[in-house]
Amino acid sequence: MKIITFRHNNQESLGLVHQDYLIPISNIGDNLPDSMDALLNAGQEGVDNLKLAFQTYLESNKETTNLSLEEVEIVAPVPRPTSLRDAYAFRQHVETSRANRGLEMIPEFDLFPVFYFSNHRAIAGPGEVYCMPDHFDRMDFELEVAVVINKEGKNIKAADADEYIAGYMIMNDLSARRLQMEEMKLNLGPAKGKDFATVIGPYLITKDELAAYKVATPAGREGALYDLKMECFVNDIKVSSGSLASMNWTFAEIIERISYGVTIYPGDVIGSGTVGTGCFLELNGTGKRKDPNYREQWLQPGDSIRMEVTALGSLENTVLLDKNL
């Protein structure tokens, strides 16, 4: 299913996207969760019940008043995550970024999946994202995929961890690189360089929708991998391309690390980290390493960012200076 959170007539609701229109949950059946929080807290049973009700609705040819996507405001599919963590799962991004700084690949990358916490109350969906002037001092996109949890658990083994995932969505981890680099010199962070906006959406795609894209997990690894093409366009020019299948740590392995001695909860969002070529920091570093005269590119006020991921849709944003300065 393609699950969406939207606002219509000043009310936030849950719906399903079918073909080119939106079906509010209230049209599909009675006693179904009408918010993402409620759906995630209902666990896999809630997802299964919604899928059954949706199939019944489609087979019934029941006439209801559905909505076009243009007449609603699409917000983040998980508007209020219970937590937000971002991992570092793609070797290509890590290795290239280190080479651009004249550093060897760090061996600890292969020992365990690392992650950091970000601001789970600075979540945005498609549309305009307003930022402060310092954020535009080397502002960057980061092309990622995120999962959301719908089952509480602790000390979860990677072999079981996919059962805790409700679905997948595109994630753009907007980054203020000047702030990030300054604070990380103190061996803490990233914090202010990341905490102002994380964009997710436009839909939450349930795992059954991705079955056709599943690929074999490499020997010695555990968890599902999906070959989903990932692309990013800035002002309609393609700047990044990769595949989710190139994750060197699976989401299942990341969940095992996260949940060691810690309980994860329905509504927790976990990002994959940046795919190879998936940000200007990496692209600029590679360009300058090859050509000292390479001209760096960073996001500017008014720039549009469009991320497209196979089966997960297209996430579009425009970054703007905050109106309230």
Image (cartoon, grey):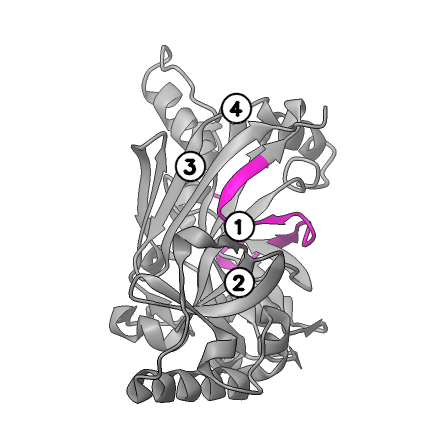
**What is the magenta range?**
105-129
Which mark sits nearer the N-terminus, 4 or 2? 2
Residue 86 x %, y %:
57, 53
Q: Is residue 126 magenta?
A: yes
Q: Nearer the viewer, mark 1 or mark 2?
A: 2
Q: Is the residue marked by circle 2 packed among few (<14), some (14-19), or many (20+) residues within 10 Å?
A: many
Tell me, for residue 33, which label it has, or none: none
Q: Is 284 left, or right, of 25 in this rendering?
A: left
Q: Quadrant of the N terminus?
A: bottom left
Q: Is the residue marked by circle 1 packed among few (<14), some (14-19), or many (20+) residues within 10 Å?
A: many
Q: Are marks 1 and 3 in contact (CB under 8 Å)?
A: no
Q: Are marks 3 and 2 in contact (CB under 8 Å)?
A: no
Q: Are marks 4 and 2 in contact (CB under 8 Å)?
A: no
Tell me, for residue 301, which label it has, or none: 4
Which mark sits nearer the N-terminus, 1 or 3? 1
Q: Quadrant of the C terminus?
A: top right
